[in-house]
Structures are given as structure tokens and as C-alpha cells.
Image: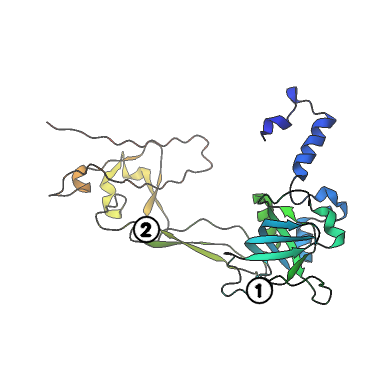
Amino acid sequence: MAVSSVCPAMGRVTARDLLFAILLLCRTIVCDSRCPKFAEKPLETRVQDASIVFRAVVVQTHFQRKTLDLALVSIYRGGLDLASISQYAGSPYNTTDRQVNLKISPQLGDCFNWSMEPSQSELVVFARISDPAVDLETTPPDGPWLEATASAVPWSLGVDIAIWNAVGWAGWGEWGSCSRTCGGGRQTRRRYCSRPTCEGYGEQMRSCNSFVCEGTINPLAPGARRNFHPAQARWGPVSDRPHAFSLRPNSYIWIASSELFGAGKTFPREFTLFVSLRLRPEVSESIVHFILASAIVG
């Protein structure tokens, strides 16, 4: 549905428009306005009251039993608790192909919109392990029930950041330089815990520069600065990145084809040029031009 259909003409908002907007917001698996008692709880309080907090996608709803089948996306808190009940071997924070079963208590039943078919809605769920003494349901084949401790909220980037902060993690830093310029390397980024201990990991790694080294040339290598124009001073160094530079306006690089394709090699009909850039956010107007130019000598 187009967003423009929600907005009245000439900027005037009527009661009908407001009702229509509220209905759109409530057409999700979760709607806090249906349970004001729990809607008053801020995210930080919901996190504190729950032993398990996770992000998940709704797979199936069961109105009669008041249960949800959820596929895990990420775990904010309680990874060890989840691993202890989910018959899962491996890292407790690895969510690949893991499904959990959530029970909704009677006092939270109205917080969930059961009239909709599952639409792959993404939620942040606050829960605990259900007490077997009061669990009258048959234990599902893929693990015991979890029980919601508060109304869930639709996932968004803002909610994600707020919950990570609530459990003690700061945001992820930038990815570091690749360990290799070709042939497959690793990049690392880190985040920091503001508490004595935080669940989860403070470091992530990913692969980079996976192309083969044979036939590659690095025009930004320290020994190739003669190619920097109009002056080397316009190419500022970047700490801890010997093959990266901070460019000033109107900087460019000029490389002779004889350096790219040495003696005995003809200029190929096809080749790949790989460039990685990061624009500075404080510069409001930045334009980057890529120009491949050649001079033909008769």
C-alpha cells in the first residue's frame, strides 16, 4: 500500500485519517495499543524483566493454543538458556536454522493480533523458559516452550540499537583493513561492553579481497605514489592502512598502461578495476568521477 494513501490532501488530518493510520500500525502480529498495561513499560524495563531477549521472524501462529512458532534471527540476552533447551549443538549465539516456540499468557493474549495470517513479521521478543510444573501443553519436538514476559515489539534499527544498549553493548565500530590485498583476507570490527560482563561476542570477522593474486597490480602500494596527482601532498595517509589514502578535492591517479600490463603482455580486451571508497559524512556535497581515458599514438 502506498504511503501517499495515508496522507490527506493539503496537509489536513481528520479523525478518519488517524483511525486509518492506527489500523495500519496494528495490522502486525504485535500491537501495544491493545494492552495499555504492558505498553507503559519502556524497552529497558522489558529487557530487565526478561531472562531471554531475541529477534525472530514469525513462522506460524496458533490462536487456540495461544502460541507462536518463531525462527531465530539474533539473540540479545539468554543465549546459554536458549541453547540448554533447544537441543542445539554449537555456539549458543549461532541462530542458523533454529526455531523456538513461544507461549502467550492470558494477560498478554490481547497484545497479539491473532486474526492475521503469518506475514513473516519480524519481532523482538521478551521471554523466559516456561516452568514445566505449569506447562500443560505437550512439549514440541524442537524444544520446550518459552513464555512471553511482556508484549513484543516490531523490530526496527532504532529498537535494535536501544536493546543492545540496554544489555550493555555499544554499537559496532567500523570494519578494519583487510589482512591481505588479494588471495583472501579477514576484516575485523569490535564493540565494547559498558558493564562488567556482557553476553555474546565483542568481535566479528568477515572475509575480504577473495580474488586471486595472480596478475593483480596494486596502484595504491606505497611505492606507487608517483602516480598520485596533482601532488602527493593531496593524498593523505590513513593510520593503520598502508594502502588507503584520504583524498583532497580534485585529486586523481594516473597510471601508464605499461605498468598495468608489462612487457610481453598485450592490452586485454577485458579487465576488472576494483575501487573501494568511503565518503566523509561531514561533507555535504561530494562528487566522485570514474574516468577511463586512453591516448592512442599513431
Residue drawn at point x = 32 percent, y = 50 percent: 220
Rendering quarter of residue 132: bottom right
Please determine whether, in this image, residue 45 is positioned above or below residue 280.
Answer: below
Q: Report the disc number at residue 210.
A: 2
Residue 87 picture location, percent across and down: 63, 75
Please determine whether, in this image, residue 284 is positioned above or below residue 106: above
Residue 242 on image: x %, y %: 36, 56
Is 131 positioned to the left or the right of 272 in the image? right
Spatial separation of the CA atoms under disc 1 and disc 2: 34 Å
Q: Residues within 10 Å of mark 1 (few under 14, many from 20)?
A: some
Element type where label 2 sits in the image? loop
Q: Position of residue 230 (x, y in %)?
A: 31, 38
Residue 158 is left or right of residue 266, and the answer is right
The answer to whether residue 164 shows anywhere in this view is no
Is residue 3 shown left or right of residue 138? left
Q: Which residue lies under the disc numbered 1?
A: 80
